[in-house]
Amino acid sequence: MTLRDALLRGRNRPRIFGEGSPTTLRGDGYEFVQLRGYIAGDDTRRIDWAATARTGALQTRVMLEDIALVFAAISDPSLSMSLGRRRALIDAADDAVAAWFAASAGEDRVMAILPQGPVPERARAGRDGARLAREALRRQPAGDFDLHDALAIARAVLPRGAALLVATDAAAAERCDDEMLGETARTFDTTLALARDPWQEELPLVGLNRLVDAESGESFVRWFGSSEREAYRRASIEREEALQRRFRRLGWRTGIFEERDGAAALAEAFGIARGALP
Amino acid sequence: MSFGAPAYLVVTAALVALAIWSLQRAARLRDARDRAFSDLAFLRRSLGGRDIVGTLIRAGWIVGVALVGLALARPHLTLPEPIHDGAVVLCIDTSGSMASTDIVPTRALAARAAAKKFIEEMSSGERVAIVAFSGAASLVQRLTARHAVAIAALDTLPAPNGPTAIGDAMALAGTLLGNHGPRTVVVVTDGVNNTGVDPFAAASSLGARGIVVDTVGIGTNSGALIPGTSEAAGIDTAALRSYARAGGGRFVRVENASALRGALGALGRVTAFRPTSVDVALASALCGALLLALCAFIAVGFGRIS
């Protein structure tokens, strides 16, 4: 299954939207996928009355849509994403964005959401469009990033039902409020590619160290021994798991990527083989 | 140019080398990419507030610098130095009143046991002699460095009998001691001087020769009689204190056997050591340098440079 197929089938989309539903808002499709419980807003012409009679509750026929998708992406350009042990996280995020845009086909369109830049132009189509959108994300100046603001821009410029990818790290993801995340997930087909903390497995700090925050410039001096490294490892894993649970609860697919392979987050989020990605 | 304490040059060179190494390494660590951290607030939150080792290192630096600075002031400490060339004369009262049983089993036997304890506490090499006195003073043991021999000699002390000639005992002790080295006379008595030469004059004479006179007064003021007499066994504490003062020593009053044993044991330790002023500047500098080196090594020696 390709990434585009997975999107159309709503694969791994949290169940609050109905299993197997590509979207509750798009137009008719042709290929029957499955029956599911009626959700307010479903086209009443798609209610399966026979199934409704059998189950005693309204049932909607889910159809695989044959429509042009909109692939949109937000890539966190903050300074914390420029860190990494062997490779910057921003480069890994670019892997995910490249694979995301490359999944577009036919009449699909792509769009880069630039939270620090001008209001995005209309979504572009075709390979050139994908290349240009990716380049636009790569050329973002490093600086402050607020996921809430970026999502607000996305909600302003993207059509309903667009497929939105957000590639960011835990620090930015943690700061975004539930209301914005939930509203965005109800409007779009949302996927979070979360950067794994590069120091999660082994904090490379031993002895007395002075650390500087990549974004705020704040610093502090502290001793690091084995117990501190273990405490950090546990806390980092717990934070990652908590973030994934939170985003899924709010209607997002989630996948984790490490600095060596950003596209792996998409494979994990959609439950498809890594080789199926472009 | 010459140096009064060339050892300090080694300490100084070591400190300079350590400072250069620490600065260089700290600079390299600062430049390392790992020093910039993506989410410092989370790191602090996950580690909690306590930083015991870091606090100890900072305290170590402060103490280390203080110790090195202290060395410049050339500090001196007064420390006890073992005396190996000293001589002590134990003068033990064997007058009739020492048969009193207010100290169990008798004053004489308690004094004998305490004297053994005194000798056991002396430094090896320190010589001891034993003088017994009642109506007159007699030599029980000449000065000897063989403490076992002196302890054995205590068993040959005469039985309690007769008056008390404290001054004669001090005079005899003075003839046993030479004119050099640490010398001490310890008088163990329960009574009032009632015969022989003036004890105060004898103690003053000893003090003038640099001989320390310690006096130990034993017995209680219970009104007990001297066995076989109608005379109360008294003790002239004021006189004994004055003898000790004249001899530049200490006076100790004890009223039971264990206190006597403890007092003589303590006196034995005191006579075994003498206070000596020691220059600890080098030790202070070395300790400070070692502490600084240890802190610097822990602080930056383990730091990984990517």
Image: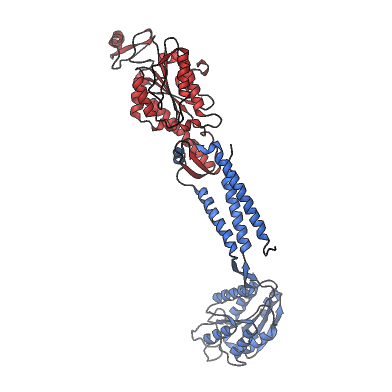
Chain colours: A red, B blue
Q: Tell me residue B115's x, y (percent).
A: 62, 77
| Snapshot quadrant of residue A187 | top left
Answer yes or no: is residue A242 visible: no
Residue nearest the observer in this picture, A215 or B198 = A215
Q: Tell me residue B268's x, y (percent).
A: 62, 74
Q: Is residue A128 above or below residue A228?
A: above
Q: Residue at x 34, y 27 (%)?
A: A180
| A128 horizontally vs B265: left or right | left
Q: Tell me residue B258's x, y (percent).
A: 55, 74
Residue nearest the observer in this picture, A111 or B146 = A111
Answer yes or no: is residue B23 visible: yes
Residue nearest the observer in this picture, B241 or A54 = B241
Q: Is residue B124 above or below residue A258?
A: below
| B234 horizontally vs A145: left or right | right
Q: Residue at x 30, y 15 (%)?
A: A38
| Snapshot quadrant of residue B97 | bottom right
| Snapshot quadrant of residue A74 | top left
Q: Is residue A172 above or below residue A71?
A: below
